[in-house]
Amino acid sequence: MRYVRFVNATTADPGRIVLLTTSHRVAPGLLSWPAWQALRAADHVLCADAAHPQLPYLREAGIRVDEASWAAEELVAACAGGRTVVVVATGEGEPALTDGLARLAGSGRVPMPELELLPASYDLPGARLLDLVQVMDRIRAECPWSSQRTHKGLAKYAIEEAYELVEAIEDGDRDELREELGDVLLQVVFHARIAEEDTETPFSVDDVAAGIVTKLVHRHPHVFGDETASTPDEVREHWLRTKAEEKQRTSVTEGVPLGQPGLALAAKLASRVRTAGLDVPLPAGEGVGYELLALAARAESEGTDPEAALRAAARAYRDAIREVEA
């Protein structure tokens, strides 16, 4: 917690003001123990917002809350004699009140109480994802364009955003990386929101998250289970084994999307063959396609991503073109 003490002009106890802040991303009523202690010990508890989500829970707990907004002078007077007033802050954090207290302290006319800023609930990591879900719900309901989108209609955007993310990674631009990650995340949340409306097999973003959590836990027995892994190769072995148990595939080619870029497709097939220990010779043929297939297979066997290698070469070619043009 953070304390801000105004300078007092007298030795009399001017009391204390506790500004109680809460997060709307945490269920109402889930307050910290220091917050409950402050509320129960207070001489007055105020809240300017009659619809504040915490009020029903505070009153259920026996806390008397006055739905009032006091001016700075009134609040200071109420604290005189060592009393404590708790102000349950609204969403804006009561800037008008704190500004008024600062002006009053600067005037030097009255002894000022101690001002304590007490966070009563905190955002956990990932809490802002709740904001994204809520914003997406409203956009889906109220935006004429977004309300008409379908999975198929949005598919191209997922591809575009993924490529823009890769470009940001290759450029090393941190701001661009953060933005493009957000754009990719939007695609996930958008598709999950559309999926909720399916009449036969609906699912939500929570179902999506639950599914990937289950998968990650199952495929990391060295983290969440009793197995051990001390090298990346051992981790990969765990991953492939648990994945094989989940998928029960009859062919190593199952699950390989044919719509991905050609070099990536060739490398993925070569990886599946190599991992499975199969001896499958490359098809004999003439032409650029077969040459590219052989190059992609060779790159994969050497641990090189042929798509990334080609993009790097293409970027170098682009820079050379610009030098000539200049």
Image: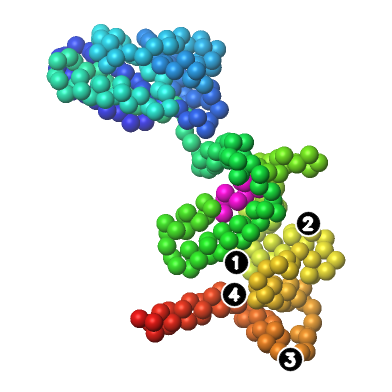
Name of the residue lying farthest toward the right:
250
Q: CA distance from mark 3 to mark 2?
A: 39 Å
Mark toward the viewer: 1 or 3: 3
Q: CA distance from mark 4 to mark 3?
A: 22 Å
Write down the residue under mark 4. 307
Residue 315: x %, y % from top left: 48, 76
Q: Do callouts 4 and 2 mark residues in contact (Cβ within 8 Å)?
A: no
20 lies above or below 242:
above
- Under mark 4, the amino acid is Glu
- Under mark 2, the amino acid is Glu
Residue 240: x %, y % from top left: 72, 64
Write down the residue under mark 1. 231
Which of disc 2 and disc 4 is earlier in sequence?
Answer: 2
Q: CA distance from mark 4 to mark 2?
A: 28 Å
111 or 178, nearer to the observer: 178
- Under mark 3, the amino acid is Glu
**Quadrant location of the C terminus in the rendered image:** bottom left
Which of disc 2 and disc 3 is earlier in sequence?
Answer: 2
Q: Which mark, by number, is residue 286?
A: 3
Q: Residue at x 60, y 41 (%)?
A: 144
**Crowd tier of the residue under label 1, counting other residues whose Cα lies within 10 Å: few below 14, some 14–19, many 20 or above:** few
